[in-house]
């Protein structure tokens, strides 16, 4: 079913691609307020991404000054008959999704990325440029206003438009949904070059199409993001399990705790790791602080080749007494059945917690791992099949690890809100309601069944070959994982998907395919946008 990974392209092959250079040359700096760069060094840079597996060189890179420039670029491409346009966020895709072979790449980072906090009746929001980095959104909102978005990704050097085009998932998503569930309004330049404001009530079809839309329907030039008061501090904790069933039971039980100060954790994630002393894949990957160590004598004799770590966090304020925080933590951890003696805690500031991956980034940059290929595999797996996934994949194919984190944690598709406000209590109105966190109207694709599903992220960080494994080997292991799951009838969907044929995309979208195609015909009828996703071919 899945011819999953297309041919692997070496860097020096990029020059052999066909070009639209002549067509692109007709578009000049004079046509926009920003600038356009045909230089080989710039276009070569735009031919690469974090994945380091695919390469496709554009004819030019456009640095727009605003949405009006992007509209001009799209209209120009439309008239050319052949050119495509790819918005590029921070180039953190894995499989060339933000590339345009011979077309125009729009460098969203160069656009005005001002971050304005607005206090509305309905609550505080941030109006943010589509090319802004989440890291900058964090700094501006927390440092200047004491506010913060509710839903994050683990790593914040990603752009707002880039993650909203996928979903944007981290340990807060169990409560607030993905980042796509935390925006109320977008400004979008469609594939026809129209600049439209959209929301649940204004141009809703475009709004929901664009969220998780893989860049297919429009370029997000601005997003209105829901904010909440930022905590000062975070108690960050990890506890270890030898048994997958206990790990998932506990993780799932945390999702349904009532929301409210001290009633539940504010962040729930987890990962699988090798039951070995391997410095990257094994026990040393668990402690949160260099002063902590992993005591393998605490691992039960029944443990298999893989162990599991539940990672949770509790927000608190500077004024909260430490003893009160300790009490809440003790009560919440007390419900869990992890291996005694294998628990870790640190207190960090809220900013340090959200920027926690930066340290790993610095290390990876220093030792060459950041610039090596990253054939990552991200999946959504149904709850019904996650135990089989553990048995077939973690305990067999990946029992020695992937050279980086193997995240696995549950997410809630929707959730019930109990009657909490006083009016409904007073009048005995049952105000419990089902709130959809993963709105089916968006373009995000999930396994079809169940309220709980799991995200599995196999984040390979290896040294470049020959010090690390050849990239083909890692790609073929990913293929083996997907094919093993499919053969065993597991229900899963790729997150940050990558396919190369219409048949595979149809399978991926399932019963959402027709709607996806209709939306494409409506908002980008010439298939100009995001050609690197390889879903539709340019029409003329
Ligand atoms: P790009 O890779 O540049 O673009 C992605 C796609 O969106 C392309 O098709 C592009 O054309 C399109 N696009 C870009 N900008 C816009 C725009 N403004 N409007 C419309 N379309 C646009 N994801 C998670 O959910 N959770 C995580 O915790 C997480 N952690 C990550 C950690 C690392 C180190 C990396 C490399 C990636 C991680 N991701 C995570 C994946 C990330 O969400 C995707 O890579 C995403 O594409 C964002 O990257 P980007 O901003 O560089 O977008």
Image: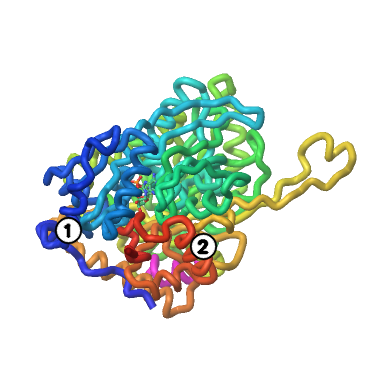
Q: Which residues are magenta?
A: 386-396
**Location of mark 2 (residue):** 446
Q: Residue furthest right?
A: 427
Q: Quadrant of residue 328?
A: top right
Residue 536 appears left or right of 455: left
The relative height of residue 139 versus residue 133 in the rendered view (above or below) is above
Q: Position of residue 400 (x, y in %)?
A: 30, 62
Q: Position of residue 479 (x, y in %)?
A: 32, 71
Tell me the residue at 22%/59% (across/down).
Answer: 54
Comparing marks 1 and 2, which lies closer to the viewer?
Answer: 1
Q: Nearer the viewer, residue 128 or 103?
A: 103
Give the spatial CA distance, label 1 vs label 2: 36 Å
Residue 140 appears left or right of 27: right
Disc 1 within 8 angstroms of ligand 1 (CB):
no
Q: Quadrant of residue 65?
A: top left
Per the picture, the main secondary structure of the magenta-coloured stretch is helix
The relative height of residue 322 versus residue 150 in the rendered view (above or below) is above
- Is residue 392 located in the magenta-colored stretch of the structure? yes
């Amino acid at each position: 079913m899945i011819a999953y990974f297309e041919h692997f392209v070496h860097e020096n092959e990029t020059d052999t691609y066909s070009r639209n250079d002549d067509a692109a040359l007709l578009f000049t700096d004079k046509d926009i307020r920003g600038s356009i760069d045909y230089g080989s060094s710039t276009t070569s840079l735009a031919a690469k991404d974090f994945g380091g597996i695919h390469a496709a060189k554009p004819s030019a890179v456009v640095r727009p000054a605003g949405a009006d420039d992007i509209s001009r670029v799209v209209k120009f491409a439309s008239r050319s008959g052949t050119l495509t346009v790819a918005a590029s966020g921070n180039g953190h895709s894995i499989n060339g999704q933000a590339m345009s072979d011979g077309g125009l790449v729009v460098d969203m980072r160069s656009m005005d990325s001002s971050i304005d906090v607005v206090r509305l009746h309905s609550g505080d929001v941030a109006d943010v440029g589509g090319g802004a980095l989440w890291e900058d959104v964090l700094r501006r909102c927390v440092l200047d206003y004491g506010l913060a978005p509710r839903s994050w990704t683990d790593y914040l050097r990603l752009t707002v438009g880039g993650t909203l085009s996928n979903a944007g998932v981290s340990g807060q998503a169990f409560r607030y949904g993905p980042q796509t569930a935390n925006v109320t309004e977008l400004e979008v330049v469609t594939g026809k070059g129209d600049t439209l404001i959209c929301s649940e009530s204004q141009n809703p079809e475009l709004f929901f199409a664009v969220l998780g839309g893989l860049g297919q329907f429009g370029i997000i030039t601005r997003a209105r993001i829901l904010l909440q008061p930022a905590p000062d501090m975070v108690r960050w904790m990890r506890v270890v399990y030898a048994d997958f069933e206990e790990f998932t039971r506990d993780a799932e039980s945390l999702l349904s705790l009532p929301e409210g100060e001290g009633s539940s954790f504010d962040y729930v994630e987890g990962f699988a790791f090798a039951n070995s002393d391997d410095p990257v894949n094994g026990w040393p990957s668990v402690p949160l602080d260099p002063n902590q160590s992993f005591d393998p004598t605490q691992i039960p004799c029944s443990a298999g080749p893989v162990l599991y770590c539940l990672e949770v966090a509790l927000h608190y304020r500077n004024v909260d007494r430490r003893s009160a925080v300790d009490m809440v933590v003790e009560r919440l951890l007390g419900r869990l059945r992890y291996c005694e003696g294998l628990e870790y805690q640190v207190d960090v500031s809220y900013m340090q917690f959200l920027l926690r991956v930066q340290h790993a980034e610095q290390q990876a940059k220093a030792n060459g791992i950041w610039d090596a290929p990253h054939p990552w595999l991200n999946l959504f797996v149904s709850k019904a099949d996650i135990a089989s996934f553990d048995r077939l994949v973690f305990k067999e194919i990946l029992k020695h690890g992937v050279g980086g984190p193997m995240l696995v944690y549950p997410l809630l598709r929707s959730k019930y809100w109990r009657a909490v406000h006083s009016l409904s209590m007073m009048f005995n109105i049952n105000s419990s309601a089902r709130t959809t966190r993963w709105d089916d109207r968006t373009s995000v694709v999930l396994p079809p069944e169940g309220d709980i599903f799991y995200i599995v992220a196999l984040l390979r960080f290896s040294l470049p070959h020959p010090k690390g494994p050849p990239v083909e080997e890692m790609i073929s292991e990913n293929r083996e994982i997907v094919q093993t799951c499919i053969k065993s009838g597991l229900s899963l969907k790729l997150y940050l998907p990558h396919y190369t044929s219409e048949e595979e995309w149809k399978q991926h979208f399932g019963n959402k395919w027709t709607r996806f195609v209709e939306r494409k015909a409506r908002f980008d009828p010439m298939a100009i946008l995001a050609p690197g996703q390889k879903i539709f071919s340019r029409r003329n």
